[in-house]
Structures are given as structure tokens and as C-alpha cells.
Image (cartoon, rainbow, N blue to C red):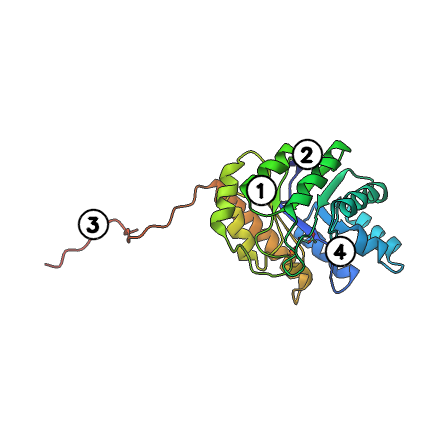
């Protein structure tokens, strides 16, 4: 069982709620995924929602899931902190997925602003889920700031590239063995999700790969299965790759022809 800020969570797939073909598809996909946590953008879904507020919120309530509000689209400490504080009022939770975007093209987090905003929010009573890079020093700073979960990207948001630097993800896992690590952003296929889970990651948060798939409901199920498979594999001590062949069939008992 995964534990996040003292809460036991059985599903290791956290789902984003943006860009689905329709609210009904989002609802079916979240159910098919068995997601227990969904992330919701205050800015996109509420502030800019042109009358969707009530409908969207009742759809989320119907799902009976834990809401993880996010600060998607924020580019400064001030903006992120204010958005988090508004989200706490609107959604009635002190959980916040903290995003402070630093680079326009890659949507790479501004890790300096991220650490500063995390410190302010932790001091204000939030339980912060920071969207970060795989940098070890930034990870340490976020933990110093009071974060108890880290959410490194594996590729730029929406890129569907999958884990572009597995070695970096592996060394982050080794660096913070006791901290829940959730890969957030850049996953494109179920095999990507299985691969990061095999590295010992605790969970995956994804949005685009399900929302923009031809069949989001089927894809949600495929991701749930892949994440579970990767998690089971990580606990089952997978083999390390070898440079030489090793016969898998015993040589004893082999027919002798000469
Ligand atoms: C929904 C959300 O919070 C995204 O910002 C998140 O980072 C997911 O990224 P992908 O869309 O690449 O899965």
C-alpha cells in the first residue's frame, strides 16, 4: 500500500483531468483506471471554465476520489502560492501539486522558485507534491523545505517521450529510498509507466497519454495494468542485463551425438 502524507492509497496511477474528449469519457477513464487520486487545475477548470464549474465538480465528486489540486500554468512564487491558497478554499484540501513553470517551450519547472514556494506553503500548513526535475540537489532542498513526496518529470509535459534519462531516475531513487517518488509528466505509453515502476518508483501521474488516446477508457485500463505489473516486478528482484549468453536450459541430460 502506498502512503502519501499519512494516507493509504491502493492505486498507484494518479490521473490528470484535462483535455478529455468529454466529461463522461474522463469519468469512465478514471473508473477504469481505478484511480483514487485525480489532479485538478484550479486555473483551467474553475477560473477559465466558462460555466463548467458546477458540472465538473459534481463529476469529480461522483468519482469519490481524493482531489489533488494543482498550480498548473503558474510562473512565479507569488502566483503559485496564491493559486494554492485559493485551491485550498475551493477544494477543501491542504494537498497541493505544486507547479512553477520556468521555461516556455519545455515547461521545465523553475526549481529555484519551486523550492521557495514549497517552503512558504509547508509553513502555511500545506502538504506539498512538487513537480520537479530528477536533480538530486533540488530533491534535497525540497525535502529540507518540508516536502514528503517528490514528483520528478521523466520528459516534458505532454511530450509522450517516456523516461529519457533512466540513469538519472535510478540515481534519484537510490538517493531518497524512503521518500515516495511519483513520476509526473512525459509518460506516453503503458510500457513507459511499467519501466519507471520497475526502477522502484512508487506511482505515476499522467494525463495526456490517456486523455488524448484514441480510446481513453481502454488506455486508462492499460496504464493501470502496466503500473501494477511494473510495481510487482520491482519487488520481485528483476535480473540485471548481461553481456554474455547464459543457457537457460540445463546442459545435463543433453543428447550426445559424437
Ligand atoms: C495534469 C498535470 O498535472 C500535468 O501537468 C502533468 O504533469 C501530466 O503530464 P502529462 O500530460 O505529460 O502526463
The Cα atoms of the two marked residues, 4 and 2, are separated by 26 Å
Q: Is any atom of residue 1 visible in this view?
A: no
Q: Is residue 95 left or right of residue 148?
A: right
Gap between marks 4 and 3 measured at Cα: 58 Å
Say if 19 sits above or below 38 in the image.
below
Quick one: quadrant of the C terminus? bottom left
Depth check, front residue: 95 or 121:
121
Distance between the alpha carbons at the discs numbered 2 and 3: 56 Å
Report the residue marked by disc 1: 202
Q: Secondary structure at mark 2?
A: loop
Among numbered discs 4 and 2, the one appearing first in the sequence? 2
In primary-sequence order, the first of circles 2 and 3 is 2
Q: Is residue 250 left or right of residue 166?
A: left
The percent coordinates of residue 257 (x first, y second) are 13, 59
* Numbered tag placed on residue 72 in the rendering: none
Residue 27: numbered disc: 4
**Label 2, residues with CA under 10 Å away: few <14, some 14-19, many ≥20:** some
Q: Which residue is mark 3?
A: 253
- The residues bearing labels 2 and 1 have C-alpha atoms spaced at a distance of 14 Å
- Separation of marks 3 and 1 at Cα, in angstroms: 44 Å
Please say if the residues under marks 2 and 1 sit with CB atoms less than 8 Å apart: no
**Disc on the earlier residue, 4 or 3:** 4
Q: Distance of mark 1 from mark 4, alpha carbons? A: 24 Å
The image quadrant in which ligand 1 is located: bottom right
Q: Nearer the viewer, residue 258 or 92?
A: 92
Q: Which element type, helix, strand or loop, lies under badge 4?
A: helix
Amino acid at each position: 500500500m502506498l502512503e502519501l502524507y499519512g494516507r493509504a492509497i491502493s492505486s498507484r496511477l494518479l490521473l490528470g483531468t484535462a483535455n478529455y474528449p468529454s466529461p463522461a469519457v474522463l469519468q469512465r477513464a478514471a473508473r477504469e483506471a481505478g484511480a483514487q487520486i485525480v489532479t485538478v487545475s484550479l486555473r483551467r477548470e474553475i477560473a477559465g471554465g466558462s460555466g463548467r464549474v458546477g458540472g465538473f465538480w459534481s463529476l469529480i465528486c461522483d468519482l469519490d476520489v481524493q482531489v489533488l489540486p494543482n498550480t498548473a500554468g503558474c510562473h512565479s512564487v507569488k502566483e503559485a502560492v496564491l493559486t494554492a491558497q485559493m485551491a485550498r478554499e475551493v477544494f477543501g484540501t491542504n494537498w497541493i501539486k505544486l507547479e512553477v513553470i520556468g521555461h516556455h517551450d519545455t515547461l521545465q519547472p523553475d526549481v529555484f522558485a519551486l523550492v521557495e514556494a514549497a517552503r512558504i506553503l509547508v509553513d502555511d500548513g500545506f502538504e506539498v507534491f512538487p513537480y520537479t526535475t530528477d536533480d538530486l540537489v533540488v530533491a534535497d532542498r525540497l525535502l529540507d523545505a518540508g516536502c514528503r513526496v517528490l514528483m520528478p518529470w521523466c520528459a516534458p509535459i505532454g511530450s509522450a517521450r517516456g523516461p529519457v534519462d533512466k540513469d538519472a531516475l535510478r540515481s534519484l531513487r537510490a538517493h531518497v529510498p524512503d521518500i515516495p517518488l511519483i513520476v509526473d509528466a512525459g509518460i506516453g505509453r503503458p510500457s513507459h509507466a511499467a519501466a519507471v515502476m520497475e526502477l522502484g518508483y512508487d506511482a505515476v501521474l499522467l494525463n495526456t497519454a490517456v486523455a488524448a488516446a484514441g480510446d481513453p477508457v481502454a488506455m486508462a485500463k492499460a496504464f493501470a495494468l502496466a503500473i501494477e505489473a511494473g510495481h510487482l516486478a520491482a519487488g520481485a528482484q528483476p535480473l540485471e542485463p548481461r553481456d554474455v549468453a547464459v543457457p537457460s536450459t540445463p546442459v545435463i541430460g543433453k543428447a550426445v551425438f559424437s
